Image (tube, rainbow, N blue to C red):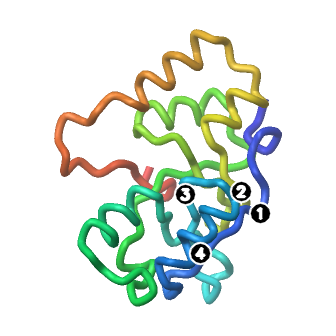
Amino acid sequence: MRIRHVMTKDPKCCAPSDPAQRAAQIMRDEDAGIVPVVDAAKGAKLAGVVTDRDLCMNVVAEGRDPTAVAVAACMTTTVVSCAATDAVAKVTELMKDNQVRRVPVVDEHGALAGIVAMADLVERAELKPTETHETLKRVSTPSETPSKPRARSRAAA
């Protein structure tokens, strides 16, 4: 099975110049913990992601005004991504290896095409219970060093 069969197509996204509050509103409205950040000037190329954790740690915990902080100032720019043609097993390994629960899906030009979450894999890809358990266990295991980068971009891989 390929990622195109299980991914969420055309997810809501924001621009690096948008206020952090916009990302939070998208998360609320879409019931999501991540919002892809795209650069419209570069053909909707994936520039990063902003997660609920990014907002909490980089805006709220620092007492910053979410209407005045640009998404670019709080987003994660080192992002692991996949292609719609990638096998579900490959993306499951990406999640395990990079300890992430959500992976943006990009086209051959790096433009955002969708997003796949661990929940999508569990619900739609019919993973075996042991695969689901192992993936969740590895994704949830704390990193050895807190300063360790969370993921690599597809282009760098």
Report how far apart the C-alphas of labels 2 and 3 lie in the structure: 12 Å
Front-lying residue, 67 or 14: 67
The residue mark sitting in front, 3 or 1, is 3
Disc 1 residue type (three-letter): Asp
Location of mark 2 (residue): 114
Is label 1 in a helix, a strand or a loop? loop
Q: Earlier in the sequence, mark 1 or mark 4?
A: 1
Asked if labels 1 and 3 touch by Cβ distance under 8 angstroms, the answer is no
Front-lying residue, 100 or 81: 100
Disc 2 residue type (three-letter): Gly
Asked if labels 1 and 2 touch by Cβ distance under 8 angstroms, the answer is yes
Q: Earlier in the sequence, mark 2 or mark 3?
A: 3
Q: Which residue sits at x=75%, y=51%? A: 8
Report how far apart the C-alphas of labels 3 and 4 lie in the structure: 13 Å
Q: Earlier in the sequence, mark 2 or mark 1?
A: 1
Location of mark 1 (residue): 10
Report how far apart the C-alphas of labels 2 and 1 lie in the structure: 5 Å
Q: Which picture quadrant has residue 55?
A: bottom left
Examine the rendering and report whether any part of residue 77 can be seen. Answer: no
Front-lying residue, 82 or 15: 15
Q: Which residue sits at x=39%, y=30%? A: 140
Disc 3 residue type (three-letter): Ile
Is label 2 in a helix, a strand or a loop? strand
Location of mark 4 (residue): 38
Residue 155 in the image: state x and y as whole percent. 49, 58
Examine the rendering and report whether any part of residue 48 can be seen. Answer: yes
Location of mark 3 (residue): 34
Q: Which residue sits at x=57%, y=10%? A: 130
Q: Is residue 110 above or below residue 136?
A: below
Is label 4 in a helix, a strand or a loop? strand
Is label 3 in a helix, a strand or a loop? strand
Disc 4 residue type (three-letter): Val
